[in-house]
Image: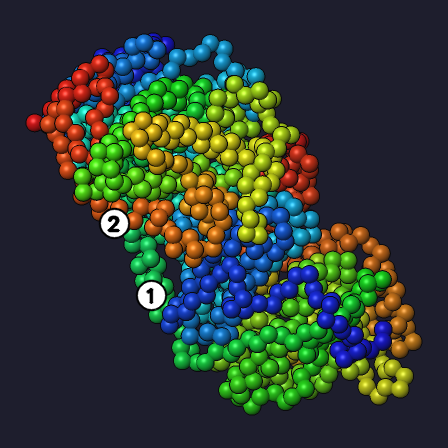
């Protein structure tokens, strides 16, 4: 199997597509449908060309190269990380046996479901973000948006490849349906509720790429451990692209916070609305919202599905191979939260059924890095206030805290008290209106909208004022 | 066997049953019942925290016996209290989820008898839905507005039409076999072929495909009747319901008959209603049920019957007996033999019987009472208890009450008179016994009794209306044993002692086999074939052994299945 992408094919790939005529024909038939979807539901703002990174090979050094090209000419392709010789299934009841190169019949339905749910989120986020281009705060940001969009599109390709290559006719039908469901559609919405809301502004976009794409990173990380080797290799490659999306979110919020801190210090006031900045309390409310809904994406504290996936060897834990236990967990227990009689308590359950919680706590640690980073920016600017992650029970619709009213500080209160204070904790209509009023496009190279600081560096060693996007 | 009447049952307040079947819409925890003109909507909205037993959460509209008790109550009430309703929509209040079926945590922790009883009751309730559609002019349709898995899809199967949302994700499925190593046994396997005429090979694919099929395929295979885009779903369901209602002939303006709560008292050794009582002899393992004849004259016309409402004797008796059967079946597992007695004035019974026959085709209320009596008798037919009829002087086994004797596995009738008693035991066959109250095999109990013996059945027909003493009844084959006063007590005692000494499992299997002769119907297959197979699976290690699929469900560990075919 060649590590370098074959760009002489219509579909760039490192899976020797030419050697599999049936698969090649199937994917070539899917390609025009994908392009039609991209034209219909991809970015609405049409640019002449965009400075994009394109994957050309899957090895560590040269997996991407940069250049201006029209979005439609982006070479969406199929890339898997290198195959590890003699890879063994690293967990579950098949631990230690050779990783599967084909789908085991017993697990077909489960694997297909995992792929479809993961695959459904990729185009969904493109659809959610389709209008953002019109209000980009700089050409640099516009380019990042497009980069994220094309790579989410490529992630769809990655899932579609697996469906086509390993799941027969039904896999092809599922691949079709990934293009039939649309974010926010009345008739055929995306599978997960969180992916049916439009991304309303750029602050939400940064929050989404920081918090929600980070859920994606962790989900991909668990699938990268899969005993189904093609899925593992696919996800390992996707994780590299996902890292860029995280970067867009992290540095995006960095820059908002920096700008806010600068305005606060410069004018010696928290009320920086009159200077065109985003007040810190609005940033905190956005953070509260996006963090809490992203926590829901991990599922309930107890999950039989995730336990089954683990035992079957389909979906591992984050960094499974670094864990010091037996990787089977048949006798282990784990402690999860429960709400009993108006109090938050903890209870021990079989560790297998608590794996959502396990992943969520990894995610929490990762999210906290960002918060510390933003607080350092505030501190360096001489601002006393701090940002923080709300309690994991705050504003939850899924799991142990669903139906309970938990404050960001972690106190269980009654529903009325919670509703009275909601406006302090979650973005209000006024917040949205205000942030919306700031969303004016800035398309002059090097210039930034007034609510966001410039980035520290440009893309791929280019200066910040590089013309990342040619609009006409 | 001494005569005991309802009044003799000692009762106390602290002996209430572990599971009660009494509820009403104001107390529902899991369903909303709303009525808009001729269309009613039953919306499933299971409260996951209010399971009947602790230890499981009923997520995704999964259900336990408590949820089904409310459904049973709603189906019953709609027929009596809302005669204007001609179409009932069953749907879900959950987002993108219709119902996930029976709660697996509940099944995994349940004892074998609990599972069997639960399935029996849910099966009976599904059949009640079909009975309402077929015979009460209340057509049920399922508005499947999200995923319907296992018992969720089986609930939809009990409806006359299934309208499935087509949103690119919602599927119908019967995943029991691949996921749980058991069967979709709330009629699912039977209804696929017998009711919906799904091709056998496609049904095989369907029940082995844990994720099920989405709207377009479901429609093509005949699993649903319509696939409706999400945006048009609610509107299409309403339109369909209105159109069905317009074709049905319910008495639109008739006021309903309210089913008041039953007056019942529970004692350590007995349960007493107004007309029905039970004496529990725990040391002997025997329950004696006594059904009292009417105290009042039969009504003069249907209007009078309706104004009596739930006090109308046949309705009151049927409701009380139904509740008693459910109570005993669920809460008194070791009382394996039921002796069925009647006490009262035969003339009053026959007057009511005649009244019912006269108005059954012209009055909706009388029709409903008859249908309820039919269902209660059917519930007895599938009850896993030995049933013995004790026909004594002062009893009133005539017409519809004679069915209670014919339900029984054996009939004991006193020949002659008891000392100091002028009366002798008689029974009376009426038109009611000739097809008004069919069994699950679609035959009357007399047709079943005399299956393949047409001349004997003809002889019984000739005797319609005649008071038959023990000799005559025995001659006609209507009773099994006719001891005289000297032997009566001993014969009955020995019969009961012998009966209770046999293996309860073998008795259940034997009685269920003998009760249903002749042709199969969908109903008899559900209670016979499907249930028997499921109950076999429910006792096998692959399902309930320590490493079986049901036991392991939710632990994340895979079941260890024996590969041996039996």
Residue B415 lies, with reference to residue A270, above or below; the image says below
Give above or below for B459 relative to B213. below
Numbered disc 1: secondary structure: helix
Q: Please give the name of the residue rendered at 56% of the width and 38% of the height, measured from the top-left corner.
A: A336
The residue at 22%/29% (across/down) is: A453
The one of A451 and B128 positioned closer to us in this rendering: A451
Q: Provide residue A332's location: percent of width, then percent of height.
A: 62, 30
Mark 1 Cα within 10 Å, few/some/many (few <14, many 20+)? few
Q: Is residue A274 above or below residue A171?
A: below
Frontmost of labels 1 and 2 is 2
Q: Which residue is mark 1?
A: B243
For the residue labelled by badge 2, is the local secondary structure a helix, a strand or a loop?
Answer: helix
Q: Position of residue A235 (x, y in %)?
A: 39, 22
Q: Which mark is residue B309?
A: none
Q: Quadrant of residue B41?
A: bottom left
Residue A430's disc number: 2
Q: Residue at x 37, y 22 (%)?
A: A239
């Amino acid at each position: 199997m060649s590590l370098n992408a074959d760009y002489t094919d219509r579909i760039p790939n490192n899976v020797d597509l030419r050697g599999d005529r049936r698969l090649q024909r199937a994917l070539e038939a899917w390609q025009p449908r994908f392009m039609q979807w991209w034209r219909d539901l991809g970015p609405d703002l049409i640019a002449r060309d965009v400075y994009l990174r394109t994957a050309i090979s899957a090895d560590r050094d040269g997996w991407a190269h940069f250049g201006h090209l029209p979005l439609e000419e982006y070479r969406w392709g199929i890339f898997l990380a290198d195959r590890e010789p003699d890879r063994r299934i690293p967990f579950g009841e098949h631990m230690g046996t050779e990783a599967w190169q084909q789908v085991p019949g017993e697990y077909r339905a489960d694997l297909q479901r995992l792929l479809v749910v993961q695959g459904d989120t990729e185009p969904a986020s493109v659809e959610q973000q389709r209008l953002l281009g019109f209000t980009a705060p700089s050409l640099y940001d516009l380019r990042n948006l497009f980069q994220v969009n094309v790579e989410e599109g490529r992630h769809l390709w990655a899932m579609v490849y697996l469906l086509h290559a390993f799941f027969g006719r039904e896999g092809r039908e599922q691949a079709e349906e990934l293009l039939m469901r649309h974010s926010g559609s009345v008739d055929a919405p995306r599978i997960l509720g969180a992916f049916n809301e439009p991304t309303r502004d750029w602050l939400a976009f940064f929050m989404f790429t920081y918090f929600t794409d980070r859920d994606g990173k962790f989900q991909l990380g668990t699938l990268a451990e899969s005993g189904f080797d093609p899925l593992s290799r696919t996800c390992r490659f996707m994780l590299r692209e996902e890292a860029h999306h995280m970067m867009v979110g992290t540095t995006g919020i960095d820059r908002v916070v920096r700008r806010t801190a600068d305005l606060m210090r410069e004018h010696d006031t928290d009320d920086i609305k009159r200077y065109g900045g985003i007040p810190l309390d609005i940033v905190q409310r956005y953070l509260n919202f996006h963090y809490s809904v992203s926590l829901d994406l991990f599922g309930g504290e107890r999950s039989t599905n995730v336990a089954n996936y683990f035992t079957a060897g389909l979906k591992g834990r984050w960094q499974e191979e670094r864990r010091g236990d037996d990787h089977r967990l048949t006798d282990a227990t784990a402690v999860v939260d429960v709400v009993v009689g108006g109090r938050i308590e903890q209870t021990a359950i079989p560790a297998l059924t608590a794996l959502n919680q396990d992943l969520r706590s990894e995610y929490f640690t990762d999210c906290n890095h960002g918060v510390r980073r933003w607080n350092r920016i505030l501190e360096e600017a001489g601002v006393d206030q701090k940002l923080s992650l709300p309690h994991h029970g705050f504003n939850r619709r899924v799991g142990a805290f669903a139906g309970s009213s938990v404050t960001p500080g972690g106190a269980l209160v009654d529903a009325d008290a919670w509703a009275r204070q909601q406006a302090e904790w979650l973005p209000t209509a006024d917040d949205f209106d205000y942030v919306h009023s700031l969303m004016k496009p800035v398309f002059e190279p090097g210039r930034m909208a007034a609510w966001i600081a410039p980035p520290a560096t440009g893309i791929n060693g280019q200066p910040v004022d590089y013309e990342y996007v040619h609009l006409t | 066997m001494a005569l005991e009447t309802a009044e003799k049952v000692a009762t106390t307040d602290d002996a209430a049953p572990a599971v009660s079947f009494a509820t009403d819409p104001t107390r529902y925890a899991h369903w909303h019942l709303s009525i808009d003109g001729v269309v009613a909507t039953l919306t499933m909205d299971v409260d996951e925290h209010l399971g009947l037993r602790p230890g499981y959460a009923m997520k995704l509209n999964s259900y336990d016996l408590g949820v089904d008790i409310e459904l049973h109550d709603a189906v019953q009430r709609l027929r009596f209290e809302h005669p204007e309703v001609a179409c009932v929509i069953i749907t879900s209040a959950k987002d993108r989820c219709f119902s996930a079926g029976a709660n697996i945590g509940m099944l995994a922790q349940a004892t074998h008898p609990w599972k069997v009883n639960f399935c029996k009751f849910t099966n009976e309730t599904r059949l009640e839905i079909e009975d309402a559609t077929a015979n009460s002019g209340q057509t049920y349709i399922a508005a499947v507005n999200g995923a319907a898995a296992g018992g969720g899809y089986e609930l939809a199967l009990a409806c006359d039409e299934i309208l499935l949302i087509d949103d690119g994700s919602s599927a119908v499925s019967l995943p029991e076999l691949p996921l749980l190593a058991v069967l979709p046994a709330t009629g699912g396997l039977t209804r696929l072929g017998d009711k919906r005429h799904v091709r056998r090979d496609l049904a095989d694919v369907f029940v082995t495909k844990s994720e099920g099929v989405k709207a377009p395929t479901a429609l093509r295979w005949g699993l649903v009747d319509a696939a409706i885009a999400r945006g048009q779903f609610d509107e299409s369901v309403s339109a369909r319901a209105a159109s069905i209602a317009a074709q049905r002939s319910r008495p639109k303006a008739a006021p309903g008959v309210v089913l008041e709560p039953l007056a019942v008292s529970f004692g350590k050794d007995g349960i007493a209603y107004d007309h029905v009582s039970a004496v529990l002899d725990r040391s002997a393992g025997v329950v004696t049920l006594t059904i009292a004849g009417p105290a009042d004259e039969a009504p003069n016309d249907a209007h009078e019957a309706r104004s009596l409402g739930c006090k109308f004797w046949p309705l009151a008796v049927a409701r009380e007996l139904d509740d008693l059967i459910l109570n005993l079946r669920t809460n008194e597992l070791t009382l394996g033999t039921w002796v069925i007695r009647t006490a009262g004035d035969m003339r009053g019974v026959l007057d009511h019987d005649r009244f019912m026959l006269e108005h059954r085709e012209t009055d909706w209320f009388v029709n409903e009472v008859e249908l309820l009596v039919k269902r209660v008798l059917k519930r007895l037919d599938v009850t896993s208890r030995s049933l013995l009829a004790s026909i004594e002087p002062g009893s009133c086994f005539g017409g519809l009450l004679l069915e209670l004797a014919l339900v029984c596995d054996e009939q004991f009738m006193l020949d002659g008179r008891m000392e100091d008693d002028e009366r002798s035991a008689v029974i009376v066959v009426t038109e009611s016994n000739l097809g008004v109250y069919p069994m699950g095999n679609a035959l009357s109990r007399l047709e079943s009794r005399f299956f393949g013996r047409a001349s004997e059945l003809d002889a019984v027909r000739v005797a319609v209306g005649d008071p038959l003493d023990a000799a005559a009844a025995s001659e006609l084959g209507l009773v099994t044993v006719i001891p005289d006063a000297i032997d009566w007590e001993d014969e009955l005692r020995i019969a009961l002692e012998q009966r209770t000494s046999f293996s309860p499992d073998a008795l259940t299997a034997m009685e269920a086999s003998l009760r249903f002769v002749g042709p199969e119907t969908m109903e008899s297959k559900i209670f016979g074939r499907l249930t028997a197979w499921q109950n076999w699976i429910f006792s096998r290690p692959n399902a309930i052994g320590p490493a079986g699929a049901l036991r392991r469900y939710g632990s994340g560990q895979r079941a260890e299945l024996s590969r041996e075919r039996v």
